[in-house]
Image (cartoon, rainbow, N blue to C red):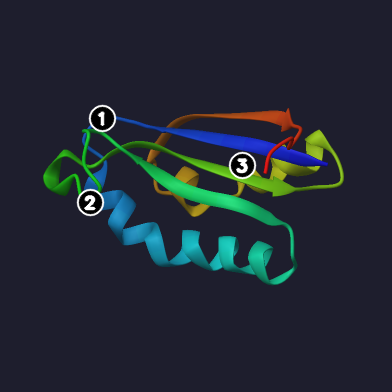
Amino acid sequence: MFYVIEGYDGTDVLAARLAARSAHLARLEALRDAGRLLLAGPCPAIDSEDPGPAGFSGSVVIAAFGSLEEAQDWAAADPYVDAGVYARVQVRPFRKVLP
């Protein structure tokens, strides 16, 4: 089943986000390579593809896991969590309808 993982950035964490980005992306690439990643990406803090110093308000990942607990464990081990980027993380089941 798919799960949506929403990470919400804390205040003034752009430098920490950039420092942890390569480790964060490596985990996403592993999901992609296993055929489990539906989509992933950051949410700009302003209405712009490149928010510059405004940074991001968080990230969204939708991926397949065997259970809600497995998705929660995966999310808890994210490098952005370890680096203090995310102030909180929410994990919910997701049912893809379209496309």
* Circle number at residue 19: none
Going from N to C along the chain, the mark reached first, 3 or 2, is 2
Going from N to C along the chain, the mark reached first, 3 or 1, is 1
Image quarter where the N terminus lies is: top right
Disc 2/disc 1 C-alpha distance (Å):
11 Å
Per the image, the residue denoted by label 3 is 76
Seen from the viewer's position, the closer of residues 27 and 50 is 50
Q: Is residue 10 left or right of residue 32?
A: left
Please state which amino acid type lies under the numbered disc 3. Ala
Classify residue 86 by image quadrant. Answer: top left
Query: x, y (%) of residue 36?
Result: 73, 58
SS class of the residue under badge 2? helix
- The residue at 73%/37% (across/down) is 96
Callout 1: few (<14), some (14-19), or many (20+) C-alpha neighbours within 10 Å? few
Query: x, y (%) of residue 63?
Result: 69, 48
Per the image, the residue denoted by label 2 is 15
Please state which amino acid type lies under the numbered disc 2. Ala
Disc 3/disc 2 C-alpha distance (Å):
20 Å
- The residue at 61%/42% (across/down) is 76
- The residue at 21%/41% (across/down) is 48
Per the image, the residue denoted by label 1 is 11
Callout 3: few (<14), some (14-19), or many (20+) C-alpha neighbours within 10 Å? some
Please state which amino acid type lies under the numbered disc 1. Thr
Q: Is residue 12 left or right of residue 96?
A: left
